[in-house]
Image: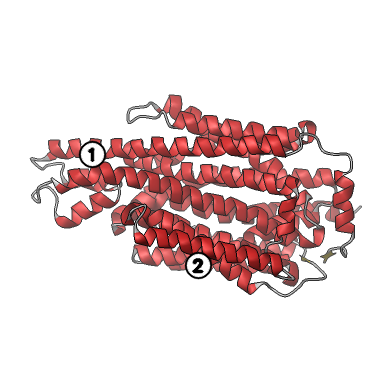
Amino acid sequence: MEAGSRTRPVLALIVLCLAEMLVLLDNTIVNVALPSMSTALHGSFSGLQWIVDAYVLTFAGLLLAFGHLGDRYGRRKVMIIGLAGVGVMSVAGALAGGIGEIIAVRAGMGVFAAAVFPATLALITTLFRDPRARAGAVAAWTAMAGFAIAIGPTAGGWLLEHFSWRSVFWINVPLAIVLVVAALVLVPESRAPQTGPLDVPGIVLSLSGVTALVWAIIEAPQNGWVSQPTLLGYALAVLLLAAFVLRELRAPHPVLNLRLFTIRRFSLPALSITVAYFSMFGFLFLITQYFQGVREYTPLEFGVRSLPFAIAIGLAAPVAVLLAQRFGTTAVIVSGLLVLALGMYIAGQVTVDSPYVGVVLVSMILMGLGLAIVQGPATEAIMSAVPEDEVGAGAGVNDTTREVGGALGVAVLGSIVAATYKVQIWPIVDTIPDSIAGPDQKEFMRETAMSIIGLREQQQTSPFAARIEQIIDQMKIAVLDGFHTATFVTVGAVLVVALVVAVALPWRRSANQQSVLLGWAEKKEPVEVS
């Protein structure tokens, strides 16, 4: 074999992992910038949630569609279009003048990111045919997620230390340009030889259903958990998602192949990834509020202190794949879920005065380890269960479970914090004299604890400074009370899934499983790779 043919897959893998990093980097950098955006643009708590979830929702809702489009028109082609789109939308984000514009831009970025993410995993699957080489490539792909999380808060903190919040959008532009060129030069095109018509009704129903569900959860603290708008949102979500399931069961070429979920080695790892990302996205959203709202760290201080969480993911992800090959997927996934639950439980013990080197650091490391132990083996198991001419669609399913879990994590856990904050802080805000805070300031205080920063700066020389400090302390306590409740909800969800996986997923790979999967794949035409 010539040296060029041996090194090209490795170079292509590097490009694909960097493309994955760009998509994930955008989310983590924006998380760090949320308090700065809130202060500069007077964004509400739900507005901050929508900055995160607008991206996640369009991303999650369109992963399946772009996975199919990649199978049909070329995975590299779809990925390149996505990278270019992310760059263009980043320019629009940098020029945005309000929270509403940023939410719209983030939704657009999510659309193009959905074109990138499944293509990276699908191309890796077609590039590396040997099972051991493929497992190693998937391990590198999952480890890159940890690196992106590591560099995101730190890079975002550095940017915010020297530039405005707009810099977190500008940074994407040169990265996208370089990756488009590198993909054209180094990544071979691949596509499936046979595809059916695109399931447009399925795409519309899935995106609409998930959006309705997350909207109802995010807005519930403001509207009331059993108010008419909230209940109507839940009812609409149930109807749309039920219609989506019926559509997919009857469609000749569904966007979501529901037969995959009859394979336990596909469905249960997918469930594990969903709850793992539910925990991770929720944890990152909450820890941002804790570090920058409660502890009042600068963005850079927050970024540096979040490094152990991300480094744990980057180091543990490839090791977890190797352990799964040695001890079996089930044992590793269950262990990872238990570590994740322990990390979240310890996070629930954090107080206003907790030292960083203690429960905060331990919980972050355990959360990172748990996520890494789950996602690597689970991803490898999912992709091994998918026929090779459907790897784009399979990657879309794999990635959708992550993003839906992440969107629900931010929505559910963020709403628990917002509801607790509302109950404890709104009555206090109503008693503040107008001489201390005007109507606009009071409204901002009701909406988010991030108002703490601006409130203290404005009242440093005020005769009411002592009273302001008391209010700030109460705001911090309210945030942490909601944080504690949210962590216990997460621990319960993770433990339930760990039990389901332990009982329902085989602990040993059956002797004929690999031959069954290979036989299924062999019934299809081979994948075209050019």
283 or 302, nearer to the observer? 283
Res 177 seen here: no
Give the side of residue 86 with respect to residue 6, left or right: left
In this picture, residue 322 sits left or right of residue 225? right
> Relative to 279, is 437 on the left or the right?
left
Task: Name which of mark 1 and mark 2 comes first in the sequence.
Answer: 2
| Residue 238: percent from left, percent from top | 52, 60
SS for callout 1: helix
Q: Which residue is mark 1?
A: 472
Residue 386: x %, y % from top left: 77, 55
Q: Residues within 10 Å of mark 1 (few under 14, many from 20)?
A: many
Q: Quadrant of residue 276?
A: top right
The crowd level at tag 2 (other Cα within 10 Å; few <14, some 14-19, many 20+) is many
**Pointer 2: what residue?**
108
Residues at marks 1 and 2, CA–CA distance in whole angstroms: 36 Å
Can residue 89 be seen here? The reply is yes
